[in-house]
Image: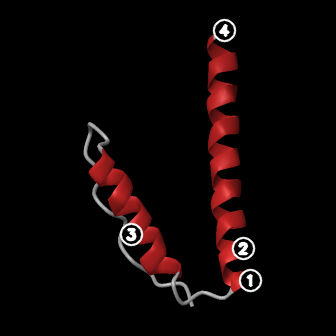
Amino acid sequence: MIHDMPKPHISPAFTIDDIHKIREWDYERLKDATPEERRADTERRAERTRRAIAELRRLQAAKA
């Protein structure tokens, strides 16, 4: 089971403490997940990231 938890607050300076917060948040979210749930979660987040990158590239190409 993947736990629904609010994302941690990340400082504008993005410090090592922020990295620790993200890792702890991710661990707590996924600690009871099955391997299949972990894989599905990773694939879902990766697809969201791919779409965001594609949109940024589209915007950069439009500016050029």
Q: Disc 1 on helix, strand or loop?
A: helix
**How far apart, in angstroms, are the residues tagged by discs 1 and 4?**
42 Å
Instruction: Return the disc, 1 or 4, that comes first in the chain's sequence.
Output: 1
Q: Residue at x 69, y 27 (%)?
A: 58
The answer to whether 10 appears left or right of 64 in the picture is left
Q: Residue at x 32, y 47 (%)?
A: 16
Q: Disc 2 on helix, strand or loop?
A: helix
Query: CB atoms at circles 4 and 2 under 8 Å apart?
Result: no
Residue wearing tag 1: 36
Q: Residue at x 64, y 54 (%)?
A: 48
Q: Disc 4 on helix, strand or loop?
A: loop
Q: Is residue 34 above or below residue 5?
A: below
Mark 1 vs mark 4: in front: 1
The image quarter containing residue 13 is top left
Instruction: Return the disc, 4 or 2, that comes first in the chain's sequence.
Output: 2
Residue wearing tag 2: 39
**How far apart, in angstroms, are the residues tagged by discs 1 and 3?**
21 Å
Q: How is the image coloured?
A: secondary structure
Query: CB atoms at circles 2 and 1 under 8 Å apart?
Result: yes
Residue wearing tag 4: 64
The answer to whether 58 appears left or right of 22 in the picture is right
Instruction: Return the disc, 1 or 3, that comes first in the chain's sequence.
Output: 3
Residue wearing tag 3: 24
Query: CB atoms at circles 3 and 2 under 8 Å apart?
Result: no
Mark 4: amino acid: Ala
Mark 1: amino acid: Glu
Q: Is residue 8 above or below residue 32?
A: above
Count of all numbered marks drawn on residues in the image: 4
